[in-house]
Amino acid sequence: MTPQPDDARTADRFRVLFEHSSDAHLIFDETGITDCNAATIELLKATDRAQVLALHPAVLSPEYQPDGRRSMEKSKEMDGIARARGYHRFEWLHRKLDGEVFPVEVTLNSVQIGGKPAMIVVWHDLTEIKRAEAELSRRTEELAAINAHLKRDLQAAARVQQALLPAALPDTTPVRLAWTFRPCEELAGDLLNIFLLDDRRVGLNLLDVSGHGVAASLLSVTASHFLTPHGDASLLRRPTVAGTPAELARPGEVLRRLNVQFCSERSEQFITLFYGILDFTAFGLCYANAGHPGPVVLSDGAAPRVLQNSGLPVGIMEQAEYADAELALGPGDRFWLYSDGLPEVMNPTGEQFGTERLLVEFQACCSESLSNAVRRVLRAVETWAGERGPQDDISLVAFEIDRS
């Protein structure tokens, strides 16, 4: 029967698409491959159409597909699905005439040609896509291995840093001591320490390096190294002539020498630092402050006192000077020293906890033991932060003088 004009146009459009598509197109029926386009010849590395038409479709697949099934068996299943639905799309491994196996996305279209069932097959070559996926997978695995290695290193560094925290508090009766430390990441820019200087004095410091992460942590560890009571690098004792006993350096002198040390190294970061020497027999505190939040003193029945004496942070100006301050304390007095991570904790709406709320918390726990009070303050700011948790390091040191 002579095709109608519309049928002829449809046939022409199909032939153009078939011949000029960049994807391989084949037609096969029960007798084998009956037609193919130029893209098929190129993809299979055949010499011409005749060579492709002479092939049995079975030779164009390896014996097994990636799922372990035989290609011959699985191809019958795919054909059956296409005939039932009218079409079927799936991934498949095919084989070129030189033996190279390559991945394709196969689309089977079940049709009638000349009154007989046939399949129009489209192969979309996935070689480059699979290669890119394999490369991405390889790089993802490499990054995962690197990240795991970095995580182990960070955890090891965190253990080293935490080993610098007070392992056990010294016996300073009748003064009781407590502290807490909560890094916001594995490595912290905060560090604190409490240590005996002699049989009547204890040193305490709390430092906070600007920024977060590895750089801040390294600087905090370095600064802490200079603020320990022992070792050649310690700044807590004045240099002496050989054979003479070392004298304790006053807090302002310690901060001045530490500042010169860090300014000479030209670090881009700075350190806020409080260092104090507490005489736990005479109840006196001598201290110096380098840009750190002012500590708080609570006495019975009195409003909280914020100690405002403060100098420049360490590492900003080499000529900076740091003054000593003296504080007389009495039985029942409680002293709070903290990093700015406490008042600057934000809730989910972006509101800071603030100094006023912190002072209220200090007062609210006056009747509790010092260790319980420290835990209560930490819980209060963690609750304020919500599920995300505090986004800065939190350090807190407290001491109180026994009432008896």
Image (cartoon, grey):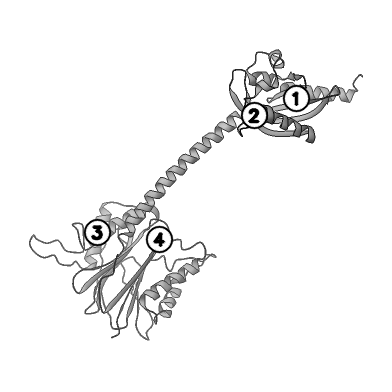
**Residue type for callout 1:** Leu
* Distance in Å between CA atoms under marks 4 and 3: 21 Å
Q: Secondary structure at mark 3?
A: helix
Circle 1 packing at 10 Å, graded few (<14), some (14-19), many (20+), is: some
Residue pictured at 44% horizontal, 66% vertical: 344
Q: Earlier in the sequence, mark 1 or mark 3?
A: 1
Q: Is residue 266 above or below residue 8?
A: below
Q: Which mark is residue 226?
A: 3
**Residue type for callout 4:** Pro
Q: Is residue 136 above or below residue 269?
A: above
Residue 59 in the image, given as x and y percentages of width and height: 66, 20
Which quadrant of the structure image shows residue 47? top right
* Distance in Å between CA atoms under marks 2 and 3: 72 Å
* Distance in Å between CA atoms under marks 4 and 2: 57 Å
Residue 350 in the image, given as x and y percentages of width and height: 52, 64
Q: Which mark is residue 183?
A: 4
The residue indicated by pointer 1 is 17
**Residue type for callout 3:** Phe
The residue indicated by pointer 2 is 70
Nearer to us: label 4 or label 3: 4
Q: Earlier in the sequence, mark 2 or mark 3?
A: 2
Nearest the viewer among 230 and 5 is 230
Are discs 4 and 3 less than 8 Å apart at CB?
no
Residue 392 in the image, given as x and y percentages of width and height: 43, 61
Instruction: Specify whether 94 is left or right of 26.
Output: left
